Image (cartoon, helix red, strand yellow):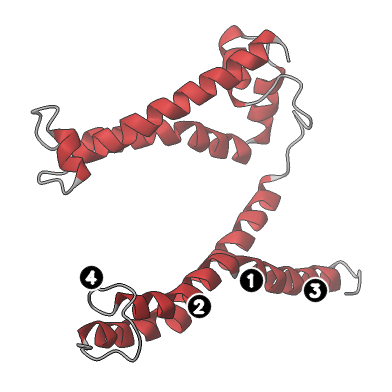
Amino acid sequence: MPIYVKLRYILKAVSAAAWLIVLPVTYAYSWKIPPGFAQTIKTFGNSPGSPSLFILAVLIYLSPNMLSTVLSLFPFIRRYLERSSNKIVVLMMWWSQPRLYVGSAMDEKPISLIKYAMFWVLLILSKLAFSYYIEIRPLVGPTKLIMQVQVTTFQGPKLFPQARNNIGVVIALWAPIIIVYFMDTQIWYAIFSTIFGGICGVFFRLGE
């Protein structure tokens, strides 16, 4: 790789490491009475809680993504920036993508981007609603009852003598739900792609 490409990767790694420090520290200072590790961080300074500092850090951290989103709505501006020879613009584009980026100056129409975003918004909302109402919510009540039950007699040896509130039973109850929660997005994608593909096939006269 050329030296400027190596420099870009190094600076991105340094930037990520810096944000890994800045965001937790500013978050710790946003609490008036911070719990746990946040209290340890806040003891290094004496400034009062300032949520605005954390919000400012988050806005700065998200600004490149927000700028990219805005530019995606106006493809002609993005094409102009990618072709520009202005030093400031070249520096901005160098940080966001390589100069010889495949597909540069070629953008989808805003309507296509909105349709694509809506596909994933509906998919994620369906996944979260199903997970909450069908998987998570019905187990909250039984979990509370299990944690209140006092077990004094065991049929076999107690594996975790110091464990309280039947935590082993709770883990065994929730483990499959957690695994399904992280895995079922691909199932929802298969369902949605089938539905949307069928609808598009009908309207474009392509069959199934």
Q: Is residue 147 left or right of residue 177?
A: left
Of labels 2 and 1, earlier in sequence is: 2
* Residue 168 in sight here: yes
Q: Amino acid at mark 2?
A: Phe
Q: Nearer the viewer, mark 4 or mark 2?
A: 4
- Image quadrant holding the C terminus, namely bottom right
Q: CA distance from mark 1 to mark 3?
A: 15 Å
* Residue 30 in sight here: no
Question: Are the residues tagged 2 and 1 within 8 Å (C-beta)?
Answer: yes
Question: Are the residues tagged 4 and 2 within 8 Å (C-beta)?
Answer: no
Of labels 1 and 4, earlier in sequence is: 4
Q: Nearer the viewer, mark 1 or mark 4?
A: 4
* Residue extending farthest front: 157
At x 46%, y 29%, the residue is 16
Q: Nearer the viewer, mark 3 or mark 4?
A: 4
- Mark number displayed over residue 130: 2
Q: Amino acid at mark 1?
A: Trp
Q: Is residue 12 left or right of residue 6?
A: left
Q: Nearer the viewer, mark 1 or mark 3?
A: 1
Q: Residues within 10 Å of mark 4 (few under 14, many from 20)?
A: few
Q: Is residue 147 above or below residue 46?
A: below
Q: Amino acid at mark 3?
A: Gly
At x 55%, y 19%, the residue is 10
Q: CA distance from mark 3 to mark 4?
A: 56 Å
- Mark 3 = which residue? 198
- Mark 1 = which residue? 188
